[in-house]
Image: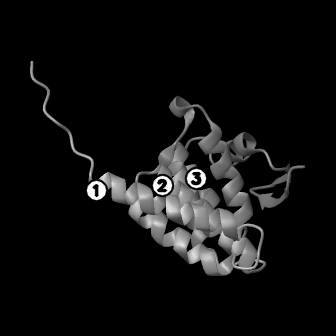
Amino acid sequence: MQEEIPEVDGYYGKFDHNLLLEKLNKNADILTCYNQIAKVFAKQPNILLSFVAKEMNAPINNSSPEAIYILGKAAYESNSFKNDTEKGKVFLTYARILYYCGRVDLALTVAKQALPLLKKTKQFDNALTTVKYYQKILKLSKNITLTSKKK
């Protein structure tokens, strides 16, 4: 079931990412549109994350890491969470975005922030597993080196 969205430049209706991008600004580049979306939906982090999910599930040649970061950061920085569980889920998703964008160190920091928010929920075990995974990756990444290939 798609979420209802508020009016955006005269557009009401079911949440359609492509139609919304088109309606926001037909002449702007895609990152300008995503910055507008981040502002419009700043108080609706779950809608922002629905854009993120669409981008992260797109084929790599059609995905925009910049858009994923812009929208994920806006969701993370939102002050409009229904409760700590929602906030923790958003934080965990943002940690995944940071990991996806190559910042395992920051992903670990944000995932740790999600832990107390999810402490008494079903998502806590997943959050703890995520923290442990990022710790392993960070440790491993510091030990990875390239050896020169002889010609």
- Residue type pointed to by label 2: Tyr
Disc 2 residue crowd, few under 14, some 14–19, many 20+, Cα 10 Å: some
Q: Earlier in the sequence, mark 1 or mark 3?
A: 3
Disc 3 residue crowd, few under 14, some 14–19, many 20+, Cα 10 Å: many
The local secondary structure at tag 1 comes to helix
Q: Is residue 37 above or below residue 63?
A: below
Q: Earlier in the sequence, mark 3 or mark 2?
A: 3
Q: Is residue 85 above or below residue 108?
A: below
What is the distance, in whole Å, between disc 2 and disc 1 at their CAs?
15 Å
Residue under pointer 2: 99
Choose top left, top right, bottom left or bottom right for residue 137.
bottom left
* Residue at image location 55% in from the left, 77% down from the top: 113
* Residue at image location 69% in from the left, 79% down from the top: 119
Q: Residue furthest top?
A: 151
Between label 2 and label 1, give the one nearer the viewer.
1
What is the distance, in whole Å, between disc 3 and disc 2 at their CAs?
20 Å
Between label 3 and label 2, give the one nearer the viewer.
2
Tell whether label 1 touches label 2 (CB within 8 Å): no
Between label 1 and label 3, give the one nearer the viewer.
1
Q: Residue furthest right?
A: 1
Residue under pointer 3: 34
Choose top left, top right, bottom left or bottom right for residue 118.
bottom right
**In this view of the protein, can residue 75 be seen by the observer?**
no
Q: Residue 116 in the image: x percent, y percent?
A: 63, 81
Position of 122 compared to 54: left or right?
right
What is the distance, in whole Å, between disc 1 and disc 3 at their CAs?
33 Å
Residue under pointer 1: 142
- Residue type pointed to by label 1: Lys
- Residue type pointed to by label 3: Tyr
> Residue 9 versus residue 58: which sits nearer the camera?
58
